[in-house]
Amino acid sequence: MSTFQAPKGTYDLIPPRSATFLAVRDAISTPLRNSGYGYIETPGFENVELFSRGVGESTDIVTKEMYTLTTKGNDHLALRPEGTASVLRAALQANLHKQGNLPVKLWYSGSYYRYERAQAGRYRHFSQVGAEAIGAEDPALDAELIILADQAYRSLGLRNFRILLNSLGDKECRPVYREALQSFLRGLDLDEETLRRAEINPLRVLDDKREAVQKQLVGAPLLGDYLCDACKAYHEEVRALVTAAGVEFEDDAKLVRGLDYYTRTTFEFVHGGLGSQSAVGGGGRYDGLSEMIGGPALPSVGWALGVDRTVLALEAEGIELDLPAVTSVFAVAIGEEARRTLFGKVTELRREGISADFSFGGKGLKGAMKDANRSGARLAVVAGERDLAEGVLQLKDMESGEQQAVAVDALLDAVRAKLA
C-alpha cells in the first residue's frame, strides 16, 4: 500500500477502464474533426481575472470553487474551472479572428478543476471535450453544435439522454426581464447570500438546486415571456434547424447554465441514469464574452461534454464499447538466442502498425504463456533454441489453440493473414 493516495474528489485513470475514457474522447471529437474544427490546447492555469470577468463574479465557480494560487512573482493564477474562457483568450492572443475565416472553429480536450463537494458524478478534477465556434452570429452554428453532440452520444450507443433547450435573450431584452425577476425575488424569504446573488445576477438564483429555494420560485417570471422579436426569431430558427436534422429536444423555460457569459441559445444534455448529477454536458451562445475579457465583439457559441459523466452514462445503460485489443501479438522466447530474435520480430511488427508485446523478465514457458493469456492477444509467437535451429517460429492462435510453424522471415505475412 502506497503512503499516498489520490486527493479527495479526484480519480486515477488506469487500464482497462482508461481505454473506455479514451474511446469516449475519440467518439466525441470525431464529429468535430469531420466538421472543420481544429484542435487547441491551453495551459492548465490562467490569470484569475480571466475567469472572474468571464465566468462571472456571482457564480459559485468563482466565489467558492476555483483553486487559486499566488506565484513567487506575485501572479494570481487559477487552475482552469472550465474551458471556454481559456480557448477564447488563446484565440484572441493568436489573432485567429483576424485571419479572415470566421467562424474560428476549435475543439479541445483536457482536465478541469473545481473545489466541489465530492460525490458520484461530481469530482474536483474532471475531464471534458469541448468545442467553440468563434466570431459568427448564426443560428445554424448553434444548431450544428447541438447536432454534433447528439451524433457523438449516439455513436457511443447512448439513448437515454435528453436535450434541454432555452433562450436567455440578449442585452436588449434581458435587462427588462432582470428587473422583473429581481422584483419577484425581493418578495421571497431568501437568505442574505442568495439575496446578494440576486442583485448581482438574478438568473443565478433560478439555478439554485436547494429545494427550499425552488419551492419559492414557483410562479417566477419566465425569460421566454420577455424575449425581444430578434431573440424570438433567432431561437425559432435554431429550433427549426435542429428539428429538421431529426434531433429531438425539449423546451425548458427554466434552463439556466451556471456561467454568466451565456446569451440567447442555451442547452443541456441530461441523462436519467446519473441521479442528482444528471447533466452530462451543455453549452450555448456567449456573444459578449470576448468584450468582457478585453477583446473585440466576437459573437460565439460552444459546448463542453463531460467524459467521466459520459462513461457513467454508458455504465448506467449497460453499454460496453467494442474496444480493440491492446495487444494483437505476444512473443514468448525460451533461451537467449530466441529472446534476441523475437525481440527483433516484435520491433518489426510494431513498425508495420501491428500491436505487439514481449514476455519480459526472463520467465519460463509456463509463466510467459500466462502473460500472453492476460494480454488478450489474438496470437502468440513462441520460439526456443530447437525452433531457431530449424529456421522457424511457432505461431499459436490463442482463441482456437491451433499452432503452426512459420519461417522466421515469413512471420510478418503470416501474422497479417491471421489478423485479416
Image (spheres, rainbow, N blue to C red):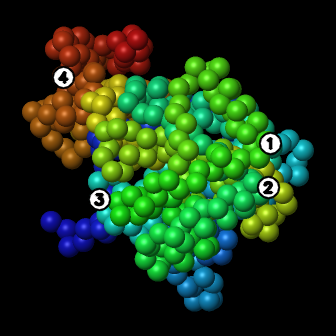
Q: CA distance from mark 1 to mark 2?
A: 9 Å
Q: Is residue 165 above or below residue 319?
A: below
Q: Amino acid at mark 4?
A: Arg
Q: Are discs 1 and 2 less than 8 Å apart at CB? A: yes
Whether residue 315 is visible here, answered yes or no, is no
Determine the secondary structure under disc 3. loop
Whether residue 364 sits left or right of residue 239 in the image: it is left
Q: Earlier in the sequence, mark 4 or mark 3?
A: 3
Question: In front: 175, or 342?
Answer: 175
Report which quarter residue 390 is drawn in: top left
Q: Earlier in the sequence, mark 3 or mark 2?
A: 3
Task: Say how many tags the image has.
Answer: 4
Residue marked by disc 4: 386
Image point (63%, 84%), residue name: 75
Q: Residues within 10 Å of mark 4 (few under 14, many from 20)?
A: few
Question: In front: 240, or 36?
Answer: 240
Residue marked by disc 3: 119
Q: CA distance from mark 3 to mark 1?
A: 41 Å
